[in-house]
Image: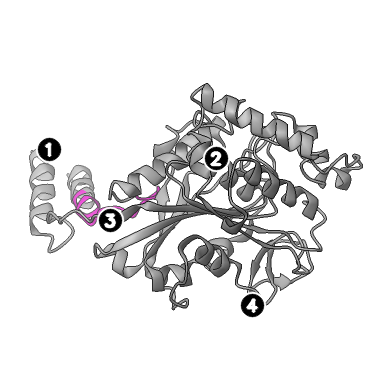
């Protein structure tokens, strides 16, 4: 009898709930397939660079702050720390950089070889891309000559100089640069967001898309957490957080034609280190709201060989890290594809419990425990 009462109680609650138990029309997005772009700071810039090269048929614009050239580390952590960045000097290691023109030429050859082995898209697709590069004059972690090697890499792949915009004269440290949020401009300290009087996000997006409407007011209601584990099958070796965030402007949630931009944080900028600062204060959401741009914020996390929650740009996940076979690359590309298909990203875990189930379980528990 207890089982019957429990089942009946759950059915009654489910049937009588006024809103959540009713079938809802599925929400769909309308993302322009030729509108996908990426950007990032530090390891996020390196990863954005990798995404652009590996998926150049899909990604048509990129903005990079403090990046090193594609596959610069060549699966070698010491090279990442001592040649493709200057971070090793913080641990007493020598700096052997920056990458020379001959080394950049070898990276271009590696890129073409990866295409011939079907590991990346045809790099010919990169030639028409719109590219923005930033390097602060006070950045001692990734000095300007390294970022200029990225510019050389793109030109060697056939990108016209008119398609590359650079900012190399801002006295910024190693950080995401904003107009008026964060630390003093010349610093390189947590949360690695600096106020420099320059709206770098605006410069990135207008370099990619042309003139845009001025940024509007972002709405907290339009920023949602989503479950990332779906995209890497729960493989902990991918070193990705269990959730990311996505900002969906009101018009995009109502079916308007929208663009898609992926924004990638740097090392030590995960939510558990700096809270919501990157995905609410870097400056993307305001431009997104007024210009119908969905902003995707994936998150990496720490793990073996990666204590600072960096994106994989030297090979801590596997040797395919920089190609379409890379674990993180496959995961983020899956997120992009899902949004391009018009589908919502899965809700973050733990999601709020369905009131139907909550009340049903309450009724069930009471009846189970009653005499």
Name the residue at 13% across, 44% down: 6
The part of the image, by quadrant, that contains residue 83 is top right
Reading the chain from its start, which is encountered first: label 4 or label 2?
Answer: 2
Q: Which residue is mark 1?
A: 3
Reading the chain from its start, which is encountered first: label 2 or label 1?
Answer: 1
Name the residue at 50% across, 28% down: 325
Cβ–Cβ below 8 Å for labels 3 and 1? no
Per the rendered image, the range of residues in magenta is: 346-360
Reading the chain from its start, which is encountered first: label 3 or label 4?
Answer: 3
Reading the chain from its start, which is encountered first: label 3 or label 1?
Answer: 1
Give the structural element (helix, strand or loop) at label 2. helix
On the rendered structure, is 22 left or right of 124?
A: left
Give me the C-alpha separation between circle 1 and circle 4.
61 Å
For the question of whether residue 225 can be seen, the reply is yes
Residue 101 % position (x, y): 78, 39
Q: Is 177 covered by the magenta stretch?
A: no
Q: Which residue is mark 2?
A: 53
Q: State which mark lies toward you, 2 or 1.
A: 2
Q: The N terminus is located in which quarter?
A: top left
Give the structural element (helix, strand or loop) at label 4. loop
Query: How many neighbours does mark 1 have within 10 angstroms: few (below 14), some (14-19), or many (20 or more)?
Result: few
Q: The C terminus is located in which quarter?
A: top left
Reading the chain from its start, which is encountered first: label 3 or label 2?
Answer: 3
Query: How many neighbours does mark 4 have within 10 angstroms: few (below 14), some (14-19), or many (20 or more)?
Result: some
Name the residue at 76% across, 41% down: 84
Q: Which residue is mark 4?
A: 180
Cβ–Cβ below 8 Å for labels 2 and 1? no
Give me the C-alpha separation between circle 3 and circle 4.
32 Å
Q: State which mark lies toward you, 3 or 1.
A: 3
């Amino acid at each position: 009898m207890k089982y019957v009462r429990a089942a009946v109680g759950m059915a009654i609650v489910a049937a009588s709930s006024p809103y959540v138990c009713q079938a809802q029309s599925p929400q769909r997005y309308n993302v322009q397939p030729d509108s996908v772009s990426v950007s990032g700071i530090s390891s996020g810039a390196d990863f954005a660079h990798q995404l652009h090269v590996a998926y150049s048929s899909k990604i048509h614009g990129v903005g990079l702050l403090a990046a090193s050239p594609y596959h610069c580390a060549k699966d070698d952590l010491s090279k990442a720390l001592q040649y493709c960045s200057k971070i090793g000097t913080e641990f007493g290691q020598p700096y052997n950089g920056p990458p020379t023109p001959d080394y950049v030429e070898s990276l271009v050859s590696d890129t073409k070889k990866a295409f011939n082995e079907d590991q990346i898209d045809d790099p010919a697709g990169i030639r028409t891309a719109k590219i923005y590069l930033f390097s602060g004059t006070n950045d001692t972690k990734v000095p300007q000559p390294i970022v200029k090697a990225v510019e050389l890499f793109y030109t060697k792949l056939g990108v016209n100089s008119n398609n590359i915009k650079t900012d190399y004269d801002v006295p910024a440290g190693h950080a995401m640069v904003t107009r008026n949020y964060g630390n003093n401009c010349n610093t390189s300290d947590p949360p690695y967001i600096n106020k420099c009087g320059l709206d770098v996000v605006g410069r990135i997006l207008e370099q990619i898309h042309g003139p845009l409407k001025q940024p509007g007011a972002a709405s907290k209601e339009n920023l949602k957490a989503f479950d990332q584990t779906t995209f890497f099958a729960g493989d902990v070796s991918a070193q990705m957080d269990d959730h990311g965030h996505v900002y969906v402007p009101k018009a995009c949630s109502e079916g308007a034609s929208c663009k898609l931009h992926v924004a990638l944080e740097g090392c030590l900028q995960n939510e558990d280190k700096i809270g919501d600062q990157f995905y609410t204060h870097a400056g993307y959401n305001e431009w997104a709201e007024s210009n119908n741009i969905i902003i995707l914020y994936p998150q990496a996390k720490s793990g073996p060989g990666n204590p600072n929650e960096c994106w994989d740009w030297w090979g801590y996940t596997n040797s395919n890290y920089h190609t379409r076979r890379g674990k993180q690359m496959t995961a983020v590309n899956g997120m992009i594809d899902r949004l391009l298909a018009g589908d919502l990203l899965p809700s973050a875990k733990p999601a709020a419990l369905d009131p139907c189930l909550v009340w049903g379980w309450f009724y069930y528990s009471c009846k189970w425990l009653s005499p």
